Image: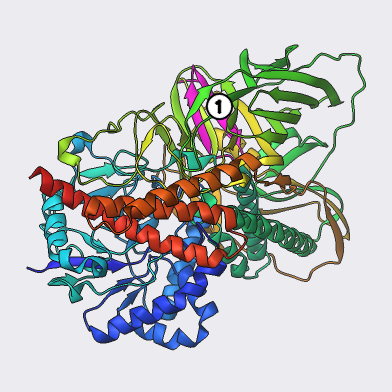
């Protein structure tokens, strides 16, 4: 039987350069694919599982659309099922759903969708991946990072079972996604490479077929491996021919860096991007449901722009500064577009609801409330019955002599101590901690450092019978940084202690966290469509020196030692069997546990995309200087603390979590209507997105609710409001503000001098190796040239960027080729 190869291209739209540059390269790439398909009727090419690349191609080359459709319809060019290759850990539910919806829609428009999950380089996988793929008709996925097998009994084929029990067939890329690429550069060794890779990998295959892949990142010169080898080119849909029945089962999240890095540091890199992205996603979700309630179609074009920023390198913050500066401009532009659209749609909806003049609460939480609620500016009687418009009653300011910095309600007792720390039911919350950060954009590695926290101001600024607002200012000082805080802590009759924070930062190479003393218990973290239970750490990692059985197999970067940093979305909760102690946060994505405390990372400041980092071995990315990753500037974030006698997967818990995650809007309405309330929908299930005139919902609870089993995803139809729009005026009193107030990105002279010096040293060493033909020398030679080009691009990305970016891309490809050749050469030496 001929060996089987999948020919593909992993297209990072943005990484070491912007999409404006890479999109200009797509034309020559497409004509090369078209030429190969015309010359070989068996040629099949996988375009990275994302249709955003096709969109880029046609923007620059609209004349190729008919040729493109022909290739797709004939099955020569495989596209979809996603719109873009998002990072699945950082975006929330609406984006994950839209990415699949738009990707499938685009693929069908061009002729056919590849019904395979193509997850070659995503930095880990969420627990509900199997159910999500099956919802969209996808029953098989190819993946690489995040996989770990017990006792290293590695299998190329396995079943991946989601947290709800749904399973998909999974193909593990044991040897990575580039183990047979660039044959044209090593024609004389093509047969030897094929046999060597097959011999290395065949023991992991239960189907009898070995997965070989000819492709790389942004490969501008795709090849036909049949020109060099007697092999068969196959589609992922047809590999393997028979999926074996005795494969192992992996369940839930796949976040391990045991065989290939999942880069936990990316959860906190350029945290300002995560804050901006989280707000824009919320506004898109809000605009979608307002459109549905008004009987209108949502604006898909805005989702497309947003989803492009969620590509794994983008939202993970590992690109060059110009990419992330462009993302910031996109988010800010979308913010003002969405703000105007939301105001207009709310005005239209309130007119249809025939509301009379007055102050209203507009709630999109499906749960009922009957509590006094304070947003930090005003205190309102929150009396709702599901989602809708509800007349509001405000609390009057209280005059009293009691100046005690304390508050008590049905859920907690809290008071501030003289140093500014808050005791919440006797446990410290809101504590600032500083560490020295020795990582890069991909990986975090911290050490303890000396620092001081100075309390500048602490006072009550507002008090009613039902609420108290405290303002605090602190300074965090060390030799690494200077951080000023402005904090507004809000107490009311709900279980939430709302903690709004503005940071003004200056410095580099530090990590700032806020901690909450939770004690011990089971750890639960909110993730897309799930509340996952986790251990405190992942120490199931391989040592720096691989065991003999895996040497030559695992050539990519790996995490080593212990990983304590994990992703979360919305909350981390410690449950002791009776009480849940919960840290809630909007837009922040990294937490870790230490000494019975949960830490949430507020800022992580670094300067390099990649460098040598403890806790990671192997090549992660380009060694490029990125001053924007220092996160110098001013930005705001919303946090909260909550203690409940409820399990984190209970309806009572989610009622309060939803109030934090989707707070009510306060509206001032002037109208001649006659209604004082309008219920739009209600449910016991949280809604997470909009599909036409239905809501996406899921069941996070431990028991079946409203016909959905635990962790099952479903839809619920909503009825749009009909009738004439009554003339009205509407003001939103608490529309969320854009989180980034000021951002600085300036290179330091010492870093520029270091770059110039290193470039000179690399050039000198490369010159000494020039002309040598042995594999080791060539591997080192291309490594030196690649690093030199990375640093040149760091210095000159504003001048001649495209030329340098292309040269770097070519050198990265040559260097990667010699990774495999060097491993082959060393294995022959040992033999």
Can residue 193 be found in the magenta stretch?
A: no
Q: Which quadrant is the N terminus positioned in? A: bottom left
The quarter of the displayed image where residue 49 is located: bottom left
Across and down, in percent, residue 587 comes to: 60, 43
- Front-most of residues 247 and 296: 247
For the point 33% across and 28% down, the residue is 539
Across and down, in percent, residue 25 comes to: 47, 73
Q: Is residue 452 above or below residue 506?
A: above
Q: Examine the rendering and report whether any part of residue 273 can be seen.
A: yes
- Front-most of residues 652 and 51: 51
Please name the colour scheme applied to the rendered image: rainbow
For the point 58% across and 58% down, the residue is 797
Q: Which quadrant is the C terminus positioned in? A: top left
SS category of the residue bearing label 1: strand
Q: Is residue 106 above or below residue 816?
A: below
Numbered range of the magenta stretch:
577-602
Across and down, in percent, residue 487 comes to: 75, 30
Q: Examine the rendering and report whether any part of residue 74 can be seen.
A: no
User: Could you tell me how many numbered marks the image carries?
Assistant: 1
How would you rate the neighbour count of disc 1 (Cα within 10 Å): few for under 14, some for 14-19, many for 20 or more? many
Q: Is residue 781 above or below residue 470?
A: below
Side (left or right) of 813 relative to 706: left
**Mark 1 sits on what residue?**
436
Q: Is residue 696 above or below residue 548?
A: below
Can residue 598 be found in the magenta stretch?
A: yes
Across and down, in percent, residue 413 comes to: 68, 16
Side (left or right) of 215 relative to 317: left
For the point 72% across and 15% down, the residue is 415
- Front-most of residues 546 and 501: 546
Instruction: From the image, give the main secondary structure of the stretch colored magenta.
Output: strand
């Amino acid at each position: 039987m001929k060996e089987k190869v999948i020919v593909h291209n992993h297209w990072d739209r943005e990484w070491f350069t912007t999409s404006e540059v890479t999109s200009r390269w797509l034309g020559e790439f497409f004509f090369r694919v078209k030429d190969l398909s015309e010359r070989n009727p068996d040629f099949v090419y996988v375009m990275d599982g994302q249709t955003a690349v096709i969109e880029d191609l046609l923007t620059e080359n609209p004349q190729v659309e008919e040729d493109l459709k022909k290739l797709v319809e004939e099955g020569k060019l495989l596209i979809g099922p996603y719109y873009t290759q998002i990072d699945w850990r950082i975006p929330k539910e609406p984006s994950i759903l839209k990415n699949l919806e738009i990707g499938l829609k685009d693929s069908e428009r061009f002729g056919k969708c590849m019904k395979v999950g193509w997850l070659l380089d995503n930095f880990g996988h969420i627990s509900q991946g199997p159910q999500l793929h099956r919802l969209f008709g996808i029953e098989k996925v190819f993946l690489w990072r995040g996989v770990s097998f017990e006792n290293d009994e590695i299998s190329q084929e396995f079943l991946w079972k989601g947290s709800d029990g749904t399973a998909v067939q999974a193909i593990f890329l044991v040897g990575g996604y580039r183990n047979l690429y660039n044959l044209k550069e090593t024609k004389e060794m093509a047969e030897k490479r094929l046999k060597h890779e097959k011999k290395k990998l065949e023991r992991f295959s239960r189907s009898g077929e070995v997965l070989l892949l000819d492709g790389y990142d942004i490969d501008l010169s795709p090849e036909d491996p049949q020109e060099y080898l007697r092999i068969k080119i196959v589609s992922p849909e047809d590999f393997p021919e028979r999926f074996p029945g005795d494969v192992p089962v992996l369940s839930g999240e796949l976040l391990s860096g045991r065989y290939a890095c999942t880069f936990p540091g990316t959860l906190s890199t350029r945290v300002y991007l995560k804050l901006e992205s989280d707000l824009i996603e919320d506004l898109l979700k809000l605009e979608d449901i307002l459109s549905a309630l008004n009987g209108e179609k949502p604006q898909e074009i805005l989702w497309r722009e947003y989803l492009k920023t969620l590509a794994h390198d983008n939202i993970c913050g590992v690109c060059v500064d110009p990419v992330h500066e462009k993302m910031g401009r996109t988010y800010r532009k979308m913010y003002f577009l969405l703000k105007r659209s939301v105001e207009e749609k709310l005005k239209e909806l309130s007119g249809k609801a025939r509301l009379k003049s007055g102050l209203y609460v507009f709630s999109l939480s499906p749960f009922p409330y009957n509590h006094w609620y304070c947003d930090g500016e005003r205190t309102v009687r929150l009396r709702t019955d599901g989602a809708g418009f509800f007349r509001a009653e405000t609390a009057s300011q209280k005059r009293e002599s009691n100046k005690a910095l304390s508050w008590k309600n049905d859920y907690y007792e809290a008071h501030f101590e003289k140093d500014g720390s808050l005791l919440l039911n006797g446990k410290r919350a809101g504590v600032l901690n500083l560490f020295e950060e020795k990582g890069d954009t991909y990986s975090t590695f911290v050490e303890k450092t000396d620092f001081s926290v100075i309390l500048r101001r602490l006072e009550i600024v507002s008090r009613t019978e039902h609420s108290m607002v405290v303002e605090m200012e602190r300074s965090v000082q060390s030799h690494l940084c200077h951080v000023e805080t402005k904090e507004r802590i809000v107490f009311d009759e709900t279980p939430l202690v709302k903690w709004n924070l503005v940071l003004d930062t200056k410095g580099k190479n530090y990590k700032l966290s806020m901690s909450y003393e939770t004690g011990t218990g089971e750890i639960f973290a909110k993730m897309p469509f799930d509340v996952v239970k986790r251990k405190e750490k992942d120490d199931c990692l391989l040592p720096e020196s691989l065991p003999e059985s895996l040497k030559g197999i695992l050539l990519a970067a790996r995490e080593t030692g212990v990983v304590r940093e994990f992703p979360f979305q919305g909350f981390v909760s410690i449950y002791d069997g009776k009480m849940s102690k919960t840290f809630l946060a909007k837009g922040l994505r990294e937490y870790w546990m230490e000494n019975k405390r949960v830490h949430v990372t507020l800022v992580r400041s670094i300067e390099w995309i990649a460098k040598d980092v403890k806790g990671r071995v192997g090549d992660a990315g380009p060694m490029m200087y990125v001053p924007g990753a220092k996160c110098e500037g001013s930005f705001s974030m919303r946090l909260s603390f909550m203690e409940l006698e409820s399990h984190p997967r209970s309806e009572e818990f989610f009622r309060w979590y939803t109030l934090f995650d989707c707070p009510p809007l306060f509206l001032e309405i002037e109208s001649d209507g006659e209604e004082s309330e309008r219920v739009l929908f209600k449910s016991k299930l949280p809604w997470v997105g909009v599909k036409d005139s239905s809501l996406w919902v899921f069941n996070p609870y431990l028991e079946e609710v409203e016909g959905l089993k635990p962790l099952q995803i479903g839809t619920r139809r909503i009825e749009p409001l009909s009738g004439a729009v009554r003339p009205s005026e509407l003001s939103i009193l608490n529309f969320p503000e854009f989180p980034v107030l000021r951002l600085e990105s300036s290179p330091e002279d010492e870093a520029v001098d270091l770059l110039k010096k290193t470039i000179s040293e690399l050039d000198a060493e490369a010159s000494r190796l020039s002309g040598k033909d042995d594999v080791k020398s060539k591997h080192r030679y291309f490594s030196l040239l690649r690093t030199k080009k990375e640093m040149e691009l760091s210095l000159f990305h504003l001048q001649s960027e495209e030329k340098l970016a292309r040269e770097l891309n070519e050198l990265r490809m040559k260097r990667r080729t010699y990774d495999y050749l060097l491993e082959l050469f060393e294995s022959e030496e040992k033999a």
